[in-house]
Image (tube, rainbow, N blue to C red):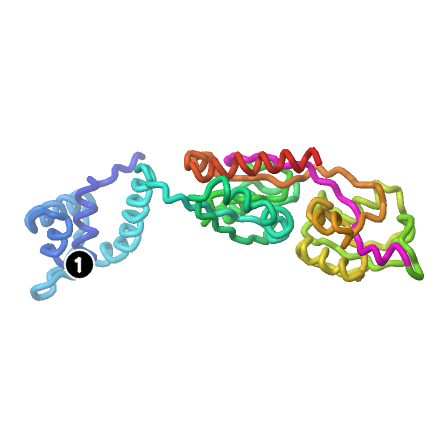
Amino acid sequence: MTFRLPPLNSLKAFEAAARHLSFKRAAAELSVTPAAVSHQIKALEAHLGVELFERAGRGLKLTHAAGVALPRLSEGFGVLADAVNRMRPQPDNGQLTVSVAPSFATRWLMPRLHRFFAAQPDVDVRITARTRLINKRGHDNAVERATVENWLEDSDVAILYGHGEYAGFRYDRLFPLTLAPICSPQLLQGENPLQHPRDLQSHLLVHDDSGALYDGVSFWDVWLKAAGIEGVDTSRGSHFSQPVLALEAVSDALGVVATFPVLAAPDLAVGRLVLPFDLQVPLQSAYYLVCPEQSLRRPPVAAFRDWLLTEAAQQAVQ
């Protein structure tokens, strides 16, 4: 059976009158006469087959049916008004909000962001840190979409680490990632110098837990398998939720971490950190720029995307 909605004007007249408990004040809000409000409400009562108001002295009182419906109806008009407003052309205030993981922000984005400022001086950039990563295959689509929407709730774009499965969004792969052990140069010397992957048995393993669910195994397990090394207990060691924390720990010679060399590039360049072994394992996951398709219509978003992809292309050839 098809349910026919009452006329919108009747619903609007009822919502205003119920909220004010006054036909007169509702009429003033809607720029009509009190008689017109009364007529619309009578038509609505006839359509629904229920009474909506009771006279209470010189005022009005809602019936049970009206009281139950009012909150949802007010909410519905609010949602409808917001939807219509979103369809109108919006003035662009030049503001750009970017959601990004703290490690990528501090280790890769921030050292380069001054170039975007120079190229787009009128864009007001706001960086929002997010810590929930989306990097596990086999996510339920609804859960994955809800997580991406959470990152984009108050942002124009997001930079996510994952496999690039973001249905319903525009996404661009930034650059390929590799995985390798990283440590302080102090560990290459001393009582147990780190010279061969087997020597990891004598050193504390530091875990970057942002990759703990990389296809169901830890980063250390991924690298050791590729290196053909057995007998290293990857269940031991210290755990950190973000690569930036793990890198700070190993810079103090706490141990060795398996993570992305790209995030350690500044420290590797000056020798604060080193790659003790040659093997870097290519990963299927990467960093992605993700945004709703319609966001690219905004000049600040389009400019940021173009700039970021250019910077990423330069990173990929280094």
Q: What residue type is labelled 1?
A: His
In-front residue for pair 211/139? 211
Stretch of the chain drawn in magenta: 167-189
Q: Can residue 183 be seen in this view?
A: yes
Furthest-bottom residue in view?
Answer: 57
Q: Quadrant of residue 139?
A: top right
The answer to whether residue 22 is left or right of residue 69 is: left
The answer to whether residue 44 is left or right of residue 129 is: left
- Across the whole image, how many numbered discs are drawn on residues? 1
Furthest-right residue in view?
Answer: 191
Residue assigned mark 1: 20
Q: Is mark 1 on a helix, strand or loop?
A: helix
Magenta-span inclusion, residue 247: no
Disc 1 crowd, CA 10 A, few/some/many (<14, 14-19, 20+): some
* As drawn, 69 above or below 293: below
Residue at 74% over, 41% down: 178
In-front residue for pair 51/260? 260
* As drawn, 75 above or below 228: below
- Residue 128 placement (x, y as % from top left): 52, 52
Residue at 50% over, 49% down: 150
- Residue 125 placement (x, y as % from top left): 47, 48
Quarter of the image where the C terminus is located? top right
In-front residue for pair 202/215? 202
In-front residue for pair 51/181? 181
The answer to whether residue 260 is left or right of residue 122 is: right
